Image (tube, rainbow, N blue to C red):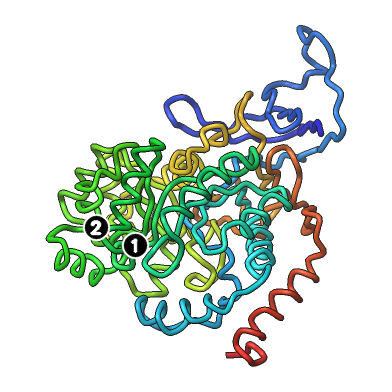
Amino acid sequence: MNTRFYNAKILVLDAENHFSIAEDELHVTGDTITYIGPGKKADPDAAETPVFDREIDARGNLLIPGFKNAHTHTPMTFLRSYADDLPLHEWLERQVFPNEAKLAGDDVYWLNILGIMEYLTSGITSNFDMYIQQKNSIAATVDTGFRTVLTSGLNNFVDSPEILEEMYNYVNELSDRTSYLLGFHAEYTTGGPLLEAVAKLAEKYHSPVWTHNAETKSEVEGCKERWGLTPTQLMERLGMFQYGGGGYHCIWMEDRDFEIFRDRKLTAVTNPSSNLKLASGICPLKRFYDNGINLAIGTDGPASNNCLDMFREMFLTTGLSKVREMDAAGIPADAILYMATAGGAHAMQLTDCDRLAAGKKADLVMIDLHQPNMQPENNLIKNLVYSGSKQNVKLTMVNGQILYENGEFHIGFDPEEIYARSNAIIRRISGSHADN
């Protein structure tokens, strides 16, 4: 599929990671962006006029790189507005773990598709997912045309080092839209022998390692009681960060933790909506930023958020940081947009999806500027971060394929079937009409 976008504004990220807006055309050949610049038909130096399967008049709308949702538990869609209003550990033990144990057959497959549909409506073109029954999850990615990086939720109750290694090799060879990085659920759910096994696999495959890290104060205190170290310091001592990686949440960090993140070139993924809803705390984003540590943004799962919306996450990321530091000028809007796009791509090792440029993968979004919340066009980057919403997502393309356009999905499934299957799953699991 070869596609031409013309009459477009294009969000460009230069080599120094500065955004600018170009008014040009963008051409896609297969899964790759092949040209950004003036119209080829008006270019006297063009050797030939390209042949396109589709030519899209952007009407002055904005093309941006797809958002990278850098922390997700996608199939938890079945617990949206069902497992709520509890502290994290009570929420996990009373609602999440018992109900997840009831997932059977191809439940995870259908629940993942529901989450992917929501990602597409929010301009998200890839996610970094941690969940159980991962072969079902990744099958949903392959069948819908989405892009997913998986990591393991290995813990004392789920999976094993052998399964982790099997999935690492399986997913990394499955598709050009699927990849796998090593990980485990969290220190407080994962015993010492399992942690050591993950470290050995990281050394074997030269892989980054990912986990929930310093999400709550009690998590860090418990780790220090067990090991005399914070979770970050423990993973460093075990040798998990030889090849990078990072942590999700990263709220309750100590001075040495920041040093390890900086020196190991790790990434902190902030999840503001989830942290607010579970009353976990506010990530010290400004300190990471000032130390040159890569930052990314994730929605977390739909049971703790409950909305898979990158626009909401961007606004909360900047707003909470300003309040935490009592500094309205703390982190500029373009840095927040970088976290949601290129920062996430760096974390997920999607180096060919980080920006719109010739030779990069065609993972992009068209933003409708012909909406009241996008006018006037004083600063389009600030409009995206401070006033943008899902209503502005006109088109979402992944790997050169348009999967969502003008409110319609092109993923090979009837949305009503996905909704019906999802409701049937939670009703079976809960033994009710899912109206809790």
Question: With respect to residue 180, does 190 lie above or below?
Answer: below
Question: With respect to residue 141, does 65 lie above or below?
Answer: above
Q: Which is more toward the observer, 43 or 296?
A: 296
Q: How many marks?
A: 2
Tell me which corner region of the image, top left, top right, bottom left or bottom right, holds residue 31.
top right
Instruction: Pinpoint residue 421: horizontal percent, then vertical percent.
Output: 74, 74
Of the numbered discs 1 and 2, the one sitting upstream in the chain is 1
Instruction: Pinpoint residue 322: horizontal percent, then vertical percent.
Output: 32, 57
Quarter of the image that includes the C terminus: bottom right
Q: Which residue is mark 1?
A: 186
Label 1: element kind:
strand
Q: Which is more toward the observer, 342 or 98?
A: 98
Q: Residue at x 61, y 56 (%)?
A: 135
Crowd class of label 2 (few under 14; some 14 to 19; many from 20; radius 10 Å) = many
Question: With respect to residue 371, does 94 lie above or below?
Answer: below
Q: Residue at x 59, y 71 (%)?
A: 77
Quarter of the image that includes the N terminus: top right
Q: Which mark is residue 231?
A: 2
Q: Are marks 1 and 2 in contact (CB under 8 Å)?
A: yes
308 relative position to 339: left or right: right
3 relative position to 201: left or right: right
Q: Amino acid at mark 2?
A: Pro
